[in-house]
Amino acid sequence: MKRSIKIFGYALLAILLLVLMAVAYIYFDGIPNYKYDPPETVRTLQVPRDSALVERGAKIATLLCNECHRSDDGKLVGKQMLDMPAELAPSYSLNITQDQEHGIGNWTDGEIYYFLRTGIHKDGHWSPPFMPKFPLMADDDLYSIIAWLRSDDPALAPDTREFPPTKWNLLVKFLSHVAFTPPPLPEKAISIPDTTDLIKYGRYVADGLCACYACHSADFTKMDLLVPENSAGFYGGGNPMLNLEGETVNSANITMDKETGIGNWTYEQFYEAVKYSKSPKGGPLYYPMFPHTTLSDVEIKGIWSYLQTVPPLKNKVDRYKPKD
């Protein structure tokens, strides 16, 4: 009996040592690096700088880039992310101006494309999940972002401001080793669906372009970048997010459940909520929801049409109420 207890104790100690070694490895190794190895078509990519692409890219930037990278003076030099969890503070977004040293002025089109798809920087380091990746975005939309980044938009003019690198905690390092990995490049071209099929088009705008499901599903750590509908609580909300004061704001259930979702909303109410961040009950919708004023009527109509097809989830979300 004593011998069995001793053997069990040794085994437990060995397991504990292995766990401690694994934790130490992850802590000191940090965010994993990956080989920067895009195909030749990406390495040699050259996006045309035509005005239509630049205009489209500027529009997409208002939806996906500006909120995180824009400073108080309007320049896209990055800023402290006040809506990040306290245990990750201080966290900073990056300078994406055309500055050669402090921004992305010396990146090639292919390097930007590869980074936006996978999160892998040209030197191999990987951006953790807080920087979105866009594996489902249409090629032309991704090209338009690149064309805009090369444009004469004053917000992108070279600027030497730079914030210190974020010091990621053990949890982020652990998740970056075991839960989050770079999505693969698309195996074939991705086209923007025709607007004549509003459901298909709306699915692209909601899932592929704007990634609405990321915030409006249950948990960032349980979302599926490649098959969004496999994300936990798909569009059922309840994802605990933070506002700029560090208060928890649970995302809304935007499935068509009539009791806990938006099944009783009219299209006009949905339009006002998306376009202008207005609540059907009167007053504003609160950050991190923000007005999507650059979305076109057909894009919003498409999202609405698509959401009609998403399976309703009965999930009552405790919505944020500002302090008096």
Image (tube, grey):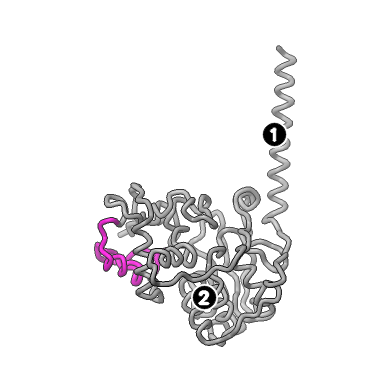
Out of 107 and 241, give the one closest to the viewer: 107
The image quarter in which residue 129 lies:
bottom right
Residue at the spot x=63%, y=55% of the render? 181
**Would residue 321 be found to the left or right of residue 244 on screen?**
left
**Which residue does the image show at 30% across and 68% down from the upper left?**
278
* Left or right of 6 on screen, residue 65: left
For the stretch drawn in magenta, the main secondary structure is: loop
Quadrant of the snapshot with the C terminus: bottom left
Find residue 87 and report its horizontal and vertical position in percent. 55, 54
Tell me whether the residue at label 1 lies in contact with that at label 2, contact meaning CB atoms closer than 8 angstroms.
no
The image quarter in which residue 241 lies: bottom left
Mark 1, other Cα within 10 Å: few <14 / some 14–19 / many ≥20: few
The type of residue carrying mark 1 is Leu
Amino acid marked by disc 2: Ser
Q: Judge by depth and name the residue closer to the eye, 137 or 29.
A: 137
Residue that numbered label 2 is attached to: 71
Q: Give percent across and percent down for residue 5.
A: 70, 18
Q: Secondary structure at mark 2?
A: loop
Relative image position of residue 40 (x, y in whole percent): 72, 71
Q: How far apart are the alpha carbons under marks 1 and 2?
A: 46 Å
Name which of mark 1 and mark 2 comes first in the sequence. Answer: 1
Which residue is under mark 1?
A: 16
- Residue 59 in view in this figure: yes
User: Magenta includes 272?
Assistant: yes
| Residue 160 numbered mark, or none | none
Stretch of the chain drawn in magenta: 263-290
> What residue sits 40% from the left and 51% below the top?
238
